[in-house]
Image (cartoon, rainbow, N blue to C red):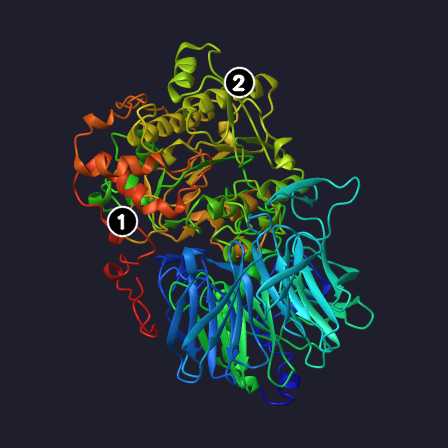
Amino acid sequence: MKTGQHSFLKSIFACFLLAAPGIQAQVISNSLEPRKDIRSPVDTSWNQFLAGDKLLANGQLLNPAGQSLNLTKGTRVLNLELAHQQQILIAKTNKRLSFIDAKDFKTLNSFDYLDKESGSMNGLAVDDNDSTIYFTGLEKNLYVGNVSSSGTFTLTKKIDLSANHKKTNPLGIGLCKNNIAFVALAITNEVAVVDLSKGKLLSTIPVGVCPYAIIISKDKKLAFVSNFGGPHPGKGDRTEKSAGTDVAVDERSVALRGSVTVIDIQSRKKIAEIATRIHPESMVLSPDGKSLYVTDDSGDGISVIDVKTLKVAHTLNTKPDPSLPYGSLTTALAFSSDGKTLLAANAGNNSIALIDPTHPAKAPYGFIAAGGFPGSIGVSGNNLFIGNVTALKGEVQKVVLPASKAEVDAYTTEASKGFHFIELLRAQATGNLNTKPKPIPDNLGEPSPIKHVVYIIKENKKFDQVLGDFGKGNCDPRLVEFGKETTPNTHELAKQFVLLDNYYCNGVNSSDGHQWAIQGITTPYHEKDFSNGHCAYDFGTDPLSYAGCGFIWNHLLRKGISFRNFGETDLAEITKGKTWTDVYNAWKNKNDSARYQCSYAMKSLEKYSDLRFPGWNMNITDQVRADAFINALKEYEAAGNLPEFIIIYLPNDHTNGYSEHTPTPRAYVTDNDWATGRVVEALSKSSFWKDMAIFINEDDPQSGTDHVDGHRSFCLVAGPYVKRDTIISNFYNQSSVLHTICQIFGVQPMNQLVAAAPLMTACFQQNPDYTAYNSLTPSIAINEMNPPKEMIKNKTTARLAPLTQKMDFSKPDLIDKDALIFSEYVWSTIHGDKPFPKAYFGAHQKGLKALGLKVDPKSREDND
């Protein structure tokens, strides 16, 4: 980057503000005046796109800057480093090391991890000799090897860093003098001291919770360790566990503190603990070595530590505008070659922020569009390399850094379109409290006739898998598994109210699906550690995976909105009886021959939960859950007061693995459908129906197939103010549901991805129709059990059923690695030996061609 270029680029964002008269003054004064004076029109044609190619499932537009290089499909790039005089770019991914010619930008070689081990979410270093490489595996190993100038890699050592033969999840690496390395051990909360020449673990140094990155001072005397979970809890702290360790949490169950531990390398002792904001993660030294830059504030900022005084000197904002809500998710840092620009990977903005470190009070002066949740950065001369964690294509990018105001302007314009900068500003604008009520107000804070919202979360279904036989809209009946006979209420609700045929789940399984469903965002910790080295396969069980914005209920409770939870994040335990049949018979016979109890790891949610309503447990029929809620509703009717916001978890459409003691997949799904219909009927016949809206969606689209894309799912909307018998093809996703709920209650969007998601205004009508819904009783018995193995009629089910018996259904979607096999099994129970349409299983984007869309030709290869 040319010297001094930053001085004339600092006001780049002013061009956006000038293009939108009045914004700048409003931002500076933090005014809540309506921002109707923002330049119009803004291109909203993307609202009609299908997800895939140009539109990500999270709603962001995809137009990555520079060149894009494809790695293997499903690759998540976790670290980037350069070797051999910056001629070889090394990409550490979840699957392998890739060695890339930095000049010609092509893959030279790759190295698959040993013993089927994945790469840990952080940990790659290059020795001063410019050819020796160190990287950490997911469970316990530090690997050492050499790369040649042609990209050939030779592994030379595998150093076991386990503790009593248990995994330690080694992460960041700091290279000291005399062949000594410090390695962060995330699970044991220690730094390993390793003799590299002998390949031996010498000792460990206790640090804070979940040590993530290690930076060695320029004089090689100090080691700085970022503790993602902060210091260990003190007396009186509220705590929850992450990977077996207590974490201090706030009233929302989000991590309470962050810290950086300072270690004297010679004595190998901790000499200081520097308090930071929450979730300190990546770190980089300033070129002169005097300052340490640490991403924190749960990804919305950077703390700058004075290396001499060991104190935070000041902080930097990384959001596109300080007035925006949470969600930039800064997760990697690097300096430009001239040291004048700090580059920050803003995963939440899908862009690289350009920051002038000499003006800490100012926002980033420009942005460069990335290819999908950028998680790592490398710099060589005037070239920027970006590693993307969740790319549709182009896992690695090569971008020429801007050398003029015009170039920064051009990069920033494209990046800002991608993360919907103007829409983010507009989403915060407040309106006229005296305006006529609308179901979905035009502006935040304007009145809505809707006073009660019920949010029903279900499990794991794609659109065509259930509604492909609907006969209207963008459906494909060839892919149906649970059609109208199995799901009469789903079909009837879509018919009576609205059919949304362009709705998507943001995530891919329940681990991130529930994050999207109740937070509208996911985090770098979760996305980088998708192999679950430290991060739990989360269903309310890992406080470090929760985003800094908290949950939808936290957001509404702060506004004074009353809330009650029925089952979300509960892992229910059966305390009397053992099998599904035991619970079913107790329900059918209305006795207590089977019992259960709730088990919430998230104590902050437990206090708002009805403990008579069980959450996840595939041995509990959804009729038990429907009864529990309907009984509670009767109590609310008697009291004349219903919580304004309610979440109901109905999980049984997830289905289960094969067992003679569990229902068939279609019986599970019809059980869920009937329970859904019964709950909607009860709500529609209550006194609260007159001002109610109901949203029903899947947490994720893990199983089954869809002809448009593997993220497409279904969302049902019901209520007097919901349109009747209407097909709506606008793009919506899980964040849209949360944005619409916030808009109804007059609450600011909880984060940037929620703020940018389209409001579901088109689903609603001004004049209410109070007609109640009558639940349909299914024709399929909910106690239709799997046949004994010897009586299975088709070869495919007979082959796959035993494989599913080994799968773990103790929590939602623990079977992610076997999701394809499980989907093939479920398909076979419906379609027999008819081949499973595997091509439509994942994020395939095959439905684009029919709509005149195509895959970006800039992609080097098709990695579908």
Residue highlighted by disc 2: 634
Measure how far apart labels 1 and 2 are at the Cα level: 39 Å
Q: Position of residue 767 (x, y in %)?
A: 44, 37
The residue sitting at 26% across, 33% down in the picture is 484
- Residue 406 vertical position relative to residue 473 in the rendered view, above or below: below
Residue extending furthest toward the right? 309
* Numbered badge on residue 364: none
The residue sitting at 31% across, 57% down in the picture is 844
User: Identity of the amino acid at label 1?
Assistant: Asn
Is residue 578 left or right of 122 when viewed as pictured? left
Q: Which is nearer the N-term, disc 1 or disc 2?
A: 1
- Residue 626 vertical position relative to residue 81 in the rendered view, above or below: above
Q: Quadrant of residue 851?
A: bottom left
Residue highlighted by disc 1: 474
Q: Secondary structure at mark 2?
A: helix
Q: 267 or 636: which is nearer to us?
A: 267
User: Identity of the amino acid at label 2?
Assistant: Lys
Q: 21 or 213: which is nearer to us?
A: 213
- Label 2 CA crowd tier, 10 Å (few <14, some 14–19, many 20+): some
- Label 1 CA crowd tier, 10 Å (few <14, some 14–19, many 20+): some
Where, quadrant-wise, is the C terminus in this rendering?
A: bottom left
The residue sitting at 40% across, 68% down in the picture is 111
Q: 33 or 343: which is nearer to us?
A: 343
Q: Position of residue 658 (x, y in %)?
A: 31, 31
Q: Is there any visible trace of residue 752 in the rendered image? A: no
Tell me, yes or no, whether the two marked residues, 1 and 2, touch with CB atoms within 8 Å. Answer: no
